[in-house]
Image: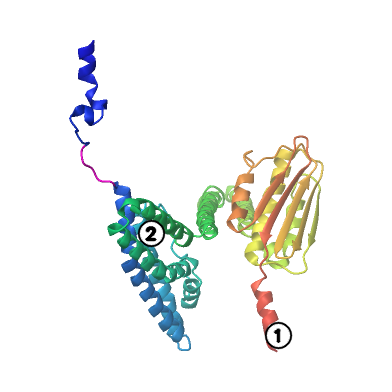
């Protein structure tokens, strides 16, 4: 038993008990500490480069703002500052382990003109925060370089603690000034999502129109052509049969015209273009299976796109009232509040309407969200149901142009 203990305990005994054997030599600093030291020593050349770039950019761009090229140079300088910020984020990611998301690109569109893109570049918050970062980094870079280099030779026993404190300050600067703006990124993500919804909705509408034309009016017109061809052949042989076929073709023409009118009304009704929301919604209400009271309180007409969305929103909701509500009466109210167009459709039916209920509510909500609108459904079991929709108000182009013309006169 004693021999077994003596053979298993030397690894846990002191140096005196093992012939003054010393532990194996190893570095006092781990790889994370050396990465932080490398980052702090690289602060000075990186800060010098960034500060020099920013000073040249600001002095040239701001100094030449009185000329034509000043603002474009400043905008180009801000785009270059974005690239410096990208390099600093990469350096912090490699040496400090700071994971900062890359900001989104500027939301330029192919239809934007030069001045729109110029203004977007000049007000870029990511570029200006990078400029501020590079300005304050020069004194900080000199300070961290001197402290780290001195501590490396004089205060090396406490250098890991010094490096960790300075590196934490660097981490805070990178997160505070080089991270993307949460609000801006959220807004960009919303716009990208809304753009996808608009594209999908437009594609679905085009497929619906193509299907309606192919299965409805086109099929009737093909039958009409065939019927008229047969009637032409029988005109001399059997005039009575030809007259009956022509009469049947006349009925087909009426049906085809009605289907084309319905399809045109589904794309954009003529009454909406000619007379506005009041008349158009009254026409929709007259086709509802329950009595509908329509109240439109608008001093002027909104933009055509907003007017069309409002019309089709009410039309879809009244179709739901006819098909699913079991209501005895319904109401439609439309009014303007500040810069919003408000729509409220209510009925005294059985209630229970939901966005995921399969009645097209989800599609309506997506369409309104895509144009910065709001869609709210209040429909408890047993009713009543009240659906409120909000759309951004935009003035009609013709009205605005006329007001400008009269103001110039």
Q: Which mark is residue 407?
A: 1
Give coordinates of residue 241: x percent, y percent.
58, 47
Q: Residues within 10 Å of mark 1 (few under 14, many from 20)?
A: few
Tell me which label, 2 or 1, sits earlier in the chain.
Answer: 2
- Tag 2 secondary structure: helix
x 75%, y 63%: residue: 336
Give coordinates of residue 107: x percent, y percent.
47, 64
| In-front residue for pair 230/145 | 145
Question: Which residue is labeled 2 in the image?
Answer: 89
Q: Residue furthest top?
A: 1
Give coordinates of residue 390: x percent, y percent.
69, 56
Disc 2 to disc 1, how far (Cα)? 52 Å
| In-front residue for pair 71/344 | 71
Magenta stretch, overall SS: loop
Count numbered badges in the picture: 2
Q: Is residue 91 visible?
A: yes
> Which part of the image, by quadrant, shows the C terminus?
bottom right
Where are the magenta residues, as a range?
24-28
Q: How is the image coloured?
A: rainbow
């Amino acid at each position: 038993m004693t021999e077994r203990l003596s053979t298993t305990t030397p690894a846990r005994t002191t140096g005196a008990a093992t012939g003054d054997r010393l532990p194996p030599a190893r570095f006092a600093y781990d790889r994370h500490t050396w990465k932080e030291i490398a980052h702090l020593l690289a602060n000075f050349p990186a800060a010098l480069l960034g500060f020099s770039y920013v000073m040249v950019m600001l002095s040239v761009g701001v100094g030449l703002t009185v000329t034509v090229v000043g603002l474009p140079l400043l905008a180009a300088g801000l785009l270059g500052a974005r690239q410096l910020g990208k390099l600093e984020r990469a350096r912090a990611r490699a040496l400090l382990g700071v994971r900062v998301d890359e900001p989104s690109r500027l939301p330029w569109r192919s239809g934007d003109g030069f001045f729109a893109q110029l203004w977007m570049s000049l007000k870029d918050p990511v570029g200006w925060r990078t400029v501020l970062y590079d300005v304050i980094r020069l004194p900080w870079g000199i300070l961290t370089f001197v402290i780290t280099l001195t501590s490396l030779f004089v205060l090396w026993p406490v250098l890991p603690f010094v490096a960790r404190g300075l590196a934490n300050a660097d981490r805070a600067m990178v997160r505070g000034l080089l991270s993307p703006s949460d609000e801006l990124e959220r807004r960009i993500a919303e716009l990208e999502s809304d753009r996808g919804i608009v594209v999908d909705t437009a594609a679905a509408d085009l497929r619906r129109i193509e299907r309606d034309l192919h299965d409805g009016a086109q099929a009737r017109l093909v039958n009409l052509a065939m019927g008229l061809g047969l009637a032409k052949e029988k005109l001399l042989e059997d005039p009575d049969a030809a007259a009956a076929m022509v009469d049947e073709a006349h009925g087909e023409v009426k049906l085809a015209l009605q289907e084309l009118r319905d399809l045109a009304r589904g794309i954009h009704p003529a009454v909406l273009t000619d007379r506005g929301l009041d008349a158009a919604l009254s026409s929709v209400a007259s086709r509802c299976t329950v009595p509908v009271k329509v109240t439109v309180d608008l001093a002027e007409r909104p933009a055509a796109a907003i007017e069309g969305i409002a019309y089709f929103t009410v039309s879809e909701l009244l179709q739901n009232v006819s098909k699913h509500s079991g209501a005895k009466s319904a109401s439609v109210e439309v009014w303007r509040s500040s810069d919003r167009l408000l729509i409220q459709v209510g009925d005294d039916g059985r209630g229970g309407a939901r966005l995921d209920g399969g009645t097209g509510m989800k599609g309506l909500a997506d369409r309104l969200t895509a144009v910065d609108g709001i869609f709210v459904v209040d429909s408890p079991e047993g009713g009543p149901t009240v659906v409120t929709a909000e759309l951004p108000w935009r003035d009609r182009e013709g009205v605005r142009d006329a007001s400008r013309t009269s103001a110039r006169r």
